[in-house]
Amino acid sequence: MPTQKVNIMWRHVAMVSAALVSLAVHGSVRADELLPRFADFGQFRPPSDYLGRIFKLSQDYPKEKPPIDAGVEKILSIDFTKDWKAYAEAVRDYIYEGNIGSGSVANDFYLEDNKVRRWYHVPWQNWGDFGREGIHGLTKEGPVNPKVLAPSQTGQWQTYAVGFYNSLGGYQIGRVWADKENPNIDIMQKEGFPVGTVVGKVLFTTAPVSEVPFLTNPIEWLAYTTATFAPIASAPPLTPRIMNTVRFIQMDFMVRDPRAAATGGWVFGTYVYNGALAHPNLWHNVVPVGLMWGNDPDATSHADSNPAPVKTEINPDLTHTVINTSPDLPPMHLGFGLRLNGPGDNTMSSCQSCHATAQYPAISAIMPSMASKDGMPLQRAAPNGCAGFAMFPAPRRSTRRRTRWTTRCNLPPACRISSRRSPRANPSSRSTDCAAPIPVKNRRVEAVNLQHGKA
């Protein structure tokens, strides 16, 4: 059965179920109350082929701005420049609490099950070739080339992920999408996300344990993926998908922390799975890769990075990135100039520089290799090749009109120099504050896919 018909079938099933329940309880109901405002997922098998649990988009966004909760207060009480590991562990525990421990890893991270705190998804990520699949809501991230994960990796594999925001982030997303057809991006441009917003994302790969030894003792999910990382289908039919096993490899997080205001306002971190730790709770077999709270615009060393790691190399010139030196950390390639990036991320990007391109319309190149000066591709080893890491303070909430460009944290993408498509040359592009992503619907859904390291 064609994919589009399958999707319609799922929505009809949901509509009929909702109508029956509502009629039974209330006797009557308006048609616009029958369905959630946003689709749960985009691509999946027909109901006759799969009888298991399906993904439900968490979209009942708070109507009133919630206070900073105790878990975030704990995170913000830790000085990330002095005890980065404690900070990273506090964020990990905050994300895990209520999202794991269901009794089966296959049932973890269904947000509707969390009895501790609410988390929320971003709408409209169901659209297109990278859209959400129907079991866990995973979106397609990108390819992972040979040798990137381990010397024994011989094949090109894929990554898939699902991200979520805490209540403060969900409140702002709900404001942007108060009108499901006409998002108010100006809210992000003027205010960005509130202090205390926490974003989590769990990433999975199709790579087998035989090629990536640190995935031993794996966390595995069933997912509806493409067989290989095929080129993006620009129009229907979409790339065919199959039921596939994916393995947990990485967890990313972002914290809107006021102490990082001078370098963009966000603290980024990432964890890598290491099954050799053999923790009884598999989700705790994670090792922090590091923390990042700025782009180090003056650091130009190690431009070739470490794309096929046999050990983790550390750049001593970085002052806004700290990398773990624990022997529990598998060899990591990291990002451009050895800035922070996770194992499944692009070796020529970094956590902050990638998210810094979040905007609508998408004008800034998400990757250095996509940028140019005077019509010529940027050379990453050029003397001014990293000038595009320039940073600006995170603006405070204000009604004053701002130049509309790139992110609220105003971080240009990695290694693009000042004469690139400048903000003043593109006043129509509006910030989505490092959102990953805030898609926009305009005649059709234009998904702004700005996830870690996607090229």
Image: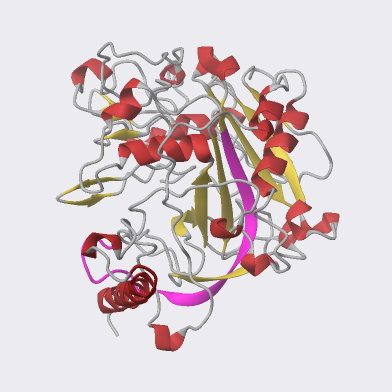
User: Height in image: 188 above or below 309?
Assistant: above
Residue pictured at 73% horizontal, 35% vertical: 90
Q: Examine the structure image and report whether residue 358 is included in the region drawn in magenta.
A: no
Q: Identify the image quadrant of residue 198.
A: top right
Total of numbered circles in the picture?
0
Q: Is residue 355 left or right of residue 288?
A: left
Q: Return the x and y of residue 132 as percentages of the image width and height.
A: 41, 61
Q: Return the x and y of residue 438 as percentages of the image width and height.
A: 36, 41
User: Height in image: 224 above or below 145?
Assistant: below
Q: Residue furthest front?
A: 27
Q: Is residue 342 left or right of residue 398?
A: right
Which is nearer the eye, 396 or 36? 36
Snapshot colouring:
secondary structure
Q: Examine the structure image and report whether residue 245 is included in the region drawn in magenta.
A: yes
Q: Which residues are magenta?
A: 233-254
Q: Return the x and y of residue 78 as percentages of the image width and height.
A: 73, 22
Q: The N terminus lies in which quarter of the figure?
A: bottom left
Which is nearer the eye, 452 or 33? 33
Q: Identify the image quadrant of residue 152.
A: bottom right
Q: Residue furthest left?
A: 443
Which is nearer the eye, 228 or 407? 407
Determine if residue 15 is in view: yes
Which is nearer the eye, 343 or 76? 76
Q: Is residue 323 left or right of residue 16?
A: right
Residue pictured at 73% horizontal, 67% vertical: 103
Residue pictured at 40% horizontal, 38% vertical: 63
Q: Return the x and y of residue 166 as percentages of the image width and height.
A: 54, 40
Determine if residue 220 is in view: no
User: Height in image: 349 above or below 395?
Assistant: below
